[in-house]
Image: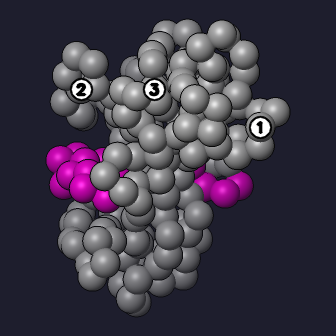
Amino acid sequence: MSEPLQFGYVSRAHGLDGQVVVKTFDPSSEVLFEIERLKLKLKDGSEHEYAIEEVAEAPGGDLRVNLEGVGNRPAAEKLVGSTVFAFREDLEAPAEGEFFQGDLVGLAALDEQGLALGTVEEIWNTGPVPNLVVRGGPGGELLVPFADEFVVKVDLQARTVVMRPPEIK
């Protein structure tokens, strides 16, 4: 079995019947409508697999999810802050030259000369293209648009992304 794909987090409980609200890296993502199960990594580090009973869109683009075995608000509240993963075998593979956004999280960010810029820690989808949030490098936090002009090469095998950040372009 391959490494699961991180695609979001549980932001809050919803209602009294155990629904959770999931925020995805990509607000236009349909992954929750395409899969029947997911894995949660709770804040305490434990991991649990859940069958998805129902997914519904909520105002503001949030997704409300009913998970099997989570039947009340206290059970849902225990899941808040959990990281949400999909099993890769349940997903259609991305096309050539495309990537799952979750695969970019954790990559070492390098400039074109090979100098470390930090690590991709988050992806913000607040504009026309996603922004890679790079932290832990000498330049502090960097926001780098995931566009050809700024992202030169993604190498998932080497766990690196070579970029030309706007600040030092």
The amino acid beneath tag 3 is Val
User: Quadrant of residue 15 in the image?
Assistant: bottom left
The residue identified by callout 1 is 139
Element carrying mark 3? strand
User: In the rendered image, which quarter contains the C terminus?
Assistant: top right
Which x, y percent locates residue 74?
A: 54, 82
Q: Residues within 10 Å of mark 1 (few under 14, many from 20)?
A: few
The residues colored magenta run 26-44
The span from disc 2 to disc 3 (Cα, nearest Å) is: 18 Å
Mark nearest the camera among 2 and 3 is 3
Q: Is residue 38 above or below residue 95?
A: below
Q: Is residue 85 above or below residue 66?
A: above
Q: Residues within 10 Å of mark 3 (few under 14, many from 20)?
A: some
The residue identified by callout 3 is 151
Q: Residues within 10 Å of mark 2 (few under 14, many from 20)?
A: few
- Of the two numbered discs 2 and 3 on the same chain, state the one appearing first in sequence: 2
Q: Horizontal placement of 43 versus 3: left or right? A: right
Based on the picture, tell me whether residue 39 belongs to the magenta stretch. Answer: yes
In the picture as drawn, the residue positioned furthest to the front comes out as 169
Q: Residue at x 66, y 10 (%)?
A: 113
Element carrying mark 2? loop
User: Quadrant of residue 133 in the image?
Assistant: top right
